[in-house]
Image (cartoon, helix red, strand yellow):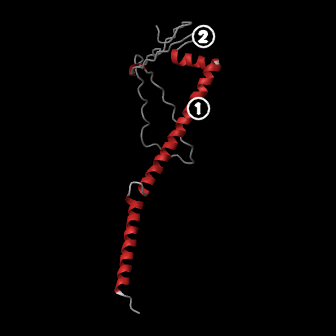
Amino acid sequence: MAHPPEQGFKLQLLAVALIAALVFLHYLLWIDENGVRQTHTLRISIRAQTEENGELTERNRALMAEIEDLKRGLMAIEERARADMGMIRPDETFYRLLEKPLSPQATPNKPTPPAKPPAPTAKLPAPTAKPPAPTAKPPASAAKPPTPTAKPTPTPGALPGRD
């Protein structure tokens, strides 16, 4: 059964239209700015923003707890005054420790620990070489006592950093 040429032309036209529609839909799906690529990018952005919001929410909770503690508790105020402003109580004594690096000459010589004798064996070989000579000790003038590195300055009621 042969189809008339008009009907074959209509089928070809319908096939071209369907292929064009399919290509257009694939363009919208994969290439267009509202397609799959954009959706994937937006999902990544949403995930990052959600994580940032969680961190900021946690920070806000900590700040709110600190505000409540400052409003109601004296311990937080005292801790803040000590840490930030260097305040002390009237019944306390303030000691300021100054650190000063030690010079290489001022460091004392550390004695070396004695060597352990070897474990006894059944048969010891005869000594073939002389035992090592004792090492010379450093002169007494090289070993000086260390200089003090901190000077306590008792000053009741003083603030650190305000000499």
State the quadrant of the N terminus: bottom left
Name the residue carrying label 2.
89
Residue 109 visible in the snapshot: yes
Total marks drawn?
2
The vertical placement of 89 against 30, above or below, is: above
Q: Amino acid at mark 1?
A: Arg
Looking at the rendered structure, the secondary structure element under dot 1 is: helix
Residue 117 visible in the snapshot: no
Q: Position of residue 81 (x, y in %)?
A: 56, 16
Gap between marks 1 and 2 measured at Cα? 31 Å
- The label on residue 22 is none
Q: Nearer the viewer, residue 73 or 54?
A: 54
The vertical placement of 125 against 66, above or below, is: below
Q: Nearer the viewer, residue 116 or 31?
A: 31
Name the residue carrying label 1.
61
- 68 left or right of 98 in image: right
Crowdedness near tag 1: few (<14), some (14–19) or many (≥20) residues, C-alpha within 10 Å = few
Please report the residue visible at 62 percent of the width from the left and 24 percent of the height from the top: 68
In the figure, residue 34 lies in which quadrant? bottom left
Please report the residue visible at 52 percent of the width from the left and 18 percent of the height from the top: 84
Please report the residue visible at 48 percent of the width from the left and 14 percent of the height from the top: 150
In the figure, residue 3 lies in which quadrant? bottom left
Mark 1 touches mark 2? (CB < 8 Å)? no
Please report the residue visible at 50 percent of the width from the left and 15 percent of the height from the top: 97
Crowdedness near tag 2: few (<14), some (14–19) or many (≥20) residues, C-alpha within 10 Å = few
